Image (cartoon, rainbow, N blue to C red):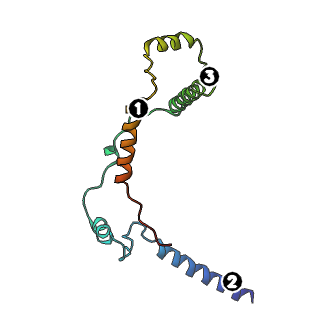
């Protein structure tokens, strides 16, 4: 009985290893492309292309002017501090209007008060004539069905 179990185990391992080896026999082989993909033709053409590939030395160097984490952190902290200072400077109750009487006195001196006169009979007649003409031009709004 034990002998048969070993044979079955050996057979299963052999079949499993053979299937695994077949599955990854050539990892650089061209993979299947989904024909429903909108770029299937381009992928297949690129896979079959024998153009020279880019070499490692052709990859451009990393730019030197990229700020470091500390520099970015410092800039963010600076902007945050400036924003908080501005918010504090314009907050309600941060300023007070004082010594306004000289300004008001100057404004009163500069302004010429209008002549307040009682309307005359001619003024009243002109106003009535205007109102009568306006009433004559006016029309009732259209009635709306309810």
As drawn, the label of residue 6 is: 2
In the current view of this chain or complex, which residue is farthest to the front?
Answer: 121
Q: Looking at the rendering, in which quadrant would you find the N terminus?
A: bottom right
Q: Which residue is drawn at 45% across and 68% down?
A: 144
Q: Which residue is drawn at 33% across and 71% down?
A: 38
| Left or right for 11, reference 29 | right
As drawn, the label of residue 43 is: none
106 shown above or below 6: above
- Residue marked by disc 1: 121
Q: Which residue is drawn at 31% across and 70% down?
A: 44
Q: Is 24 in front, or is 104?
A: 104
Q: Can residue 64 be spotted in the picture?
A: no
Q: Is 135 in front, or is 8?
A: 135
118 shown above or below 145: above
| Left or right for 5, reference 66 | right
Q: Residue 143: x and y, percent?
A: 44, 67
Instruction: Measure how far apart labels 3 and 2 are at the Cα level.
Output: 90 Å
Label 1 secondary element:
helix
Q: Can residue 124 be spotted in the picture?
A: yes
Q: Residue 140: x and y, percent?
A: 41, 60
Instruction: Measure how far apart labels 1 and 3 are at the Cα level.
Output: 56 Å
- Residue marked by disc 3: 94
132 shown above or below 14: above
Q: Nearer the viewer, mark 1 or mark 3?
A: 1
Q: Are marks 1 and 2 in contact (CB under 8 Å)?
A: no
Instruction: Measure how far apart labels 1 and 2 are at the Cα level.
Output: 131 Å
Q: In terms of image quadrants, where is residue 63?
A: top left
Q: Residues within 10 Å of mark 3 (few under 14, many from 20)?
A: few
Q: Nearer the viewer, mark 1 or mark 2?
A: 1
Q: Nearer the viewer, mark 3 or mark 2?
A: 3
Label 2 secondary element:
helix
């Amino acid at each position: 009985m034990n002998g048969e179990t070993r044979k079955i185990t050996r057979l299963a391992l052999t079949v499993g290893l053979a299937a695994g080896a077949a599955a990854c026999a050539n990892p650089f082989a061209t993979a299947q492309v989904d024909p429903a993909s909108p770029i299937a033709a381009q992928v297949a053409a690129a896979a079959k292309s024998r153009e020279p590939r880019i070499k490692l030395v052709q990859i451009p160097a990393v730019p030197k002017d990229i700020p470091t984490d500390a520099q970015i952190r410092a800039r963010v902290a600076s902007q945050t501090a400036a924003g908080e200072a501005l918010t504090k400077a314009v907050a309600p109750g941060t300023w007070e209007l004082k010594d306004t009487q000289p300004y008001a006195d100057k404004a009163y001196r500069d302004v010429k008060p209008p002549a307040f006169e009682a309307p005359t009979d001619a003024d009243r007649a002109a106003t009535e004539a205007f109102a009568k003409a306006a009433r004559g031009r006016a029309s009732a709004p259209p009635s709306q069905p309810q």
